[in-house]
């Protein structure tokens, strides 16, 4: 059955909204799985994807430079770098290594961490995509 385009758009939008609402219920992985992973000792690897609207690229670069310099001074910081996508220059990746989860948690409470997130918030094209990893040996 062929539906008129406006009706298709409404149906697709409604389905997308419903899936967005149901996703945390159907796929309840995030918090509890992450908490279990946090109990491991040793270095913690963090990769964060930051996508901003193109007109915020320069402002974000400046904020990332300052954030990187400040974060490298945090106790427990082993490595802190940020990368810029070669083609989509408004997409960034932050790669961090911390001595342990406690050092990373302390880093998040630092004023420069809070200030960085506040500075780039208006330009975010998508939510922070922050992923925590343990080294597999």
Image: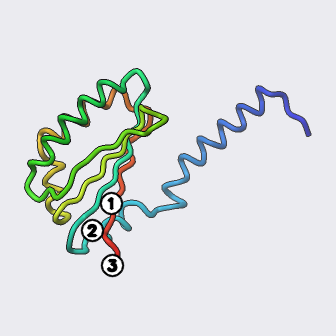
**Mark 1 Cα-neighbour bin, 10 Å: few <14, some 14–19, many ≥20:** some
Q: Is 126 situated above or below 134?
A: above
Task: Check disc 1 and report its element: helix, strand or loop.
Answer: strand
Residue drawn at 49 percent across, 35 percent down: 87
> Of circles 3 and 2, which is in front?
3
Residue 1, by quadrant, is top right
The quarter of the rendered structure image containing the C terminus is bottom left
Residue drawn at 25 percent across, 73 percent down: 39
> Of circles 1 and 3, which is in front?
3
Q: In screen coordinates, is 111 left or right of 123? A: left
Q: In screen coordinates, is 52 left or right of 15? A: left
Residue 60, by quadrant, is top left
**Mark 3 Cα-neighbour bin, 10 Å: few <14, some 14–19, many ≥20:** few
For residue 132, the mark is 1
Say whether marks 1 and 2 touch (CB < 8 Å): yes
Instruction: Pick whichever, 66 or 108, lies toward us.
Output: 66
- x, y percent for residue 83: 34, 43
Q: Give the alpha-carbon distance from disc 1 to disc 3, as whole Å.
A: 16 Å
Which residue is label 3 attached to?
Answer: 137
Residue drawn at 41 percent across, 32 percent down: 90
> Of circles 1 and 2, which is in front?
1
Sequence-earlier tag: 3 or 2: 2
Q: Is 50 situated above or below 32?
A: above
Q: What's the colour scheme?
A: rainbow
- x, y percent for residue 23: 53, 54
What residue occupies the far front of the structure in this picture? 86
- x, y percent for residue 35: 30, 66
Q: Give the alpha-carbon distance from disc 1 to disc 2, as whole Å.
A: 8 Å
Which residue is label 2 attached to?
Answer: 38
Q: Is 34 situated above or below 95?
A: below
């Amino acid at each position: 059955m062929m539906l008129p385009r406006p009706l298709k758009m409404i149906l697709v939008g409604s389905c997308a909204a419903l899936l967005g609402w149901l996703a945390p219920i159907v796929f309840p992985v995030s918090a509890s799985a992450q908490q279990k992973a946090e109990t491991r000792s040793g270095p913690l690897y963090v990769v964060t994807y930051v996508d901003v609207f193109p007109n915020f690229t320069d402002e974000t670069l400046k904020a990332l430079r300052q954030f990187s310099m400040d974060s490298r001074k945090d106790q427990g910081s082993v490595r802190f770098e940020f990368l810029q996508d070669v083609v989509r220059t408004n997409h960034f990746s932050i790669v961090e290594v911390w001595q342990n989860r406690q050092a990373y948690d302390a880093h998040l409470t630092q004023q420069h961490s809070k200030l960085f997130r506040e500075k780039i918030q208006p330009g975010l094209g998508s939510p922070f995509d922050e992923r925590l990893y343990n080294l597999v040996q």
